[in-house]
Image (cartoon, rainbow, N blue to C red):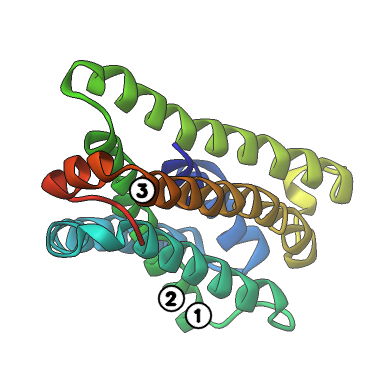
Amino acid sequence: LWSHFTVQFGATVFALLWGFPFLVSGQGLTPGAASDLLIVMTVTAVATSPLIGAFVTRWPYSRSTLVLWIVGAIMAVWAVVLLWPGRAPLWLLVVLVVVLAVGGPGSMVGFDLARTFNPPTRLGSASGIVNVGGFVASLSTVALIGIVLDQVAPGGPSTYTVDSFRVAMSVQYIVWVIGLVQILRFRRKARAAQQSDPSVRSAEGSRGAHVS
């Protein structure tokens, strides 16, 4: 749940609602150029999905590490964009959408973790719980960004600027920090359970345990 919660929402929020106005009103791109960047997101997600799958298959013990690296990269690039004086250059916006797009397939690691740590009879409900995580984060962040924009640009979309989006998009860090804290918290619990119970280590090892 927390892996899906933390990795998925950035791409969802950007692609479904706030990315287009951020690029047009905040960054000064034409609607056509903004649309092209959203297409780049889609192509990147398609291209990186097999790579994420191959990583998870080859290094199952490093799935949470992969999640943390993806989240860290997204947070770092967003920080550069938001701290850039004035509008960000096009090349940086391309980097942003590419890194955000990796969060889509990266969030699917949560379902693989659910498969590993739950018996087959509970996989349906476990997958549903994982899915809830990402979309709770996405809808909450969409609402938070809108609330902040209403405060800093009360005149509506016609008054959105790079500075108003700079403030509004920063609320994503609240959600990321919550998710990262929970990932690290439950990773420690999983490690402790595997260290204290040899039967757990044996059972999980046979299915590709998550310990790092």
Q: Which of 22/53 is in front?
A: 53
Q: Which of 12/28 is in front?
A: 12
Compute the Cα span from label 2 to label 3: 19 Å
**Of tags 1 and 3, which is closer to the observer?**
3
Mark count? 3
**Of tags 2 and 3, which is closer to the observer?**
3
Tell me: 194 left or right of 146: left
Badge 1 amino acid: Leu
**Disc 2: which residue:** 95
Q: Residue at x 18, y 45 (%)?
A: 202
Badge 2 amino acid: Val
Quick check: 144 above or below 128? Answer: below
Q: Helix, strand, or loop for circle 2? A: helix
Numbered circle sitting on residue 41: none
Q: Residue at x 22, y 35 (%)?
A: 115
**Disc 1: which residue:** 92
Point out the tag, 1 or 3, that comes first from the N-terminus. 1
Q: Helix, strand, or loop for circle 3? A: helix
Q: Residue at x 72, y 46 (%)?
A: 157
Q: In which quadrant of the rendered image does the C terminus lie?
A: bottom left
Q: Helix, strand, or loop for circle 1? A: helix
Compute the Cα span from label 1 to label 3: 23 Å
Residue 61 coordinates in the image, percent (x, y)? 26, 60
Residue 169 coordinates in the image, percent (x, y)? 68, 56
Residue 161 coordinates in the image, percent (x, y)? 76, 62
Q: In which quadrant of the rendered image does the N terminus lie?
A: top left
**Disc 3: which residue:** 107
Badge 3 amino acid: Ser
Q: Residue at x 39, y 46 (%)?
A: 196
Compute the Cα span from label 1 to label 2: 5 Å
Q: Are marks 1 and 2 in contact (CB under 8 Å)?
A: yes
Residue 36, visible in the rendered structure: no
